[in-house]
Image (cartoon, grey):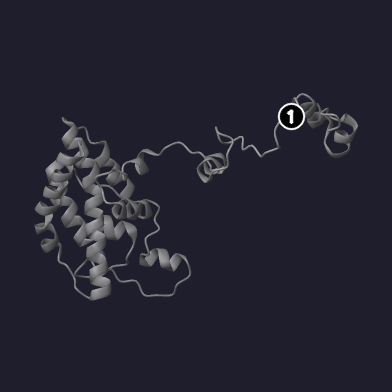
Amino acid sequence: MEDREWVAWKLAEVLPCVMVQQVLAVVGPDGAFPDRMILLASTSGQFSLSSTYREVREMKPLSFLFRQIWDASVPLKVSFFMLRLLSNRLPLDDVLVARGFQLPSKCSCCLVSNTESLRHLFLEGELATTVWQFFGSVGRLALNVNHVWVWLIGWWLKPMKSEQLRFMFRILPSLICWHIWKARNTAVFQGSVQLPTEFASRGQSIITRAADMCATGL
Ligand SMILES: [Zn+2]
């Protein structure tokens, strides 16, 4: 600028013609105040990490599936665990093999071991089958699906007569999956196998806990 006016030919040396026109349309500073940086992404003009994050992050529509796992009544560690489960990023044998690890696969949830996978551990194994049938009988849900997602969606979409029941059926699958995962880790890392019948016998305490959450979460 010279004498507080844009110099078009100097702008044209460094900017495309279209941008020169855009710059010329902007009224220059009057010189009464020192120059300062303005961040357009922020309403105050000040730089902040939150406004910059909002500016650069990739906005996606909210997924029904992933929305179900976040609730103030559910411990964050359980919600993050469910995020990994739904993304198939739990360190199960089939995932490790797919990433190049050479290992024999042996599940810890059946009396006769099978290959460990997300579908097997959380849906088709003896532990999962027993546990889901126990809890599914409460909501009259039939375990005749072939994907964990489909099974969970069945729980989350089940019509309910009250807000309390809807809330309970939203958080119960996360708690159940979390306890299956804990039982699996206990078996793998401590060698203590939990029989499906023992696990199912604890079902009442899980339901009680969900009911407590239901009471405090509404
Ligand atoms: Zn198994």
Residue projecting furthest to the right: 9
Above or below, 184 relative to 63: below
52 relative to 125 in the view: left or right? right
Task: Say which of 30 and 47 sits in front.
Answer: 30
- Which residue occupies 11% across, 63% down? 198
Q: Visible in this render: residue 40? A: yes
Report the quarter where the N terminus lies.
Answer: top right
Q: Quadrant of residue 158?
A: top left
Q: Compared to 42, does 86 lie above or below?
A: below
Quarter of the image where one finds residue 88: bottom left
Left or right of 61 in this view: 35: right
Q: Nearer the viewer, residue 31 or 207?
A: 31
Q: Residue visible at 61% across and 38% down? A: 39
Report the residue that reaches farthest toward the front: 32
* Residue name at image x 85 percent, y 34 percent: 11
Where is mark 1, residue-wise? 29
> Would you say the beta carbon of the disc 1 residue lies within 8 angstroms of ligand 1?
no
Label 1 neighbour load within 10 Å: few <14, some 14-19, many 20+: few
* Ligand 1 quadrant assignment: bottom left
Name the spot of residue 172 as percent of width and height, x first: 21, 47
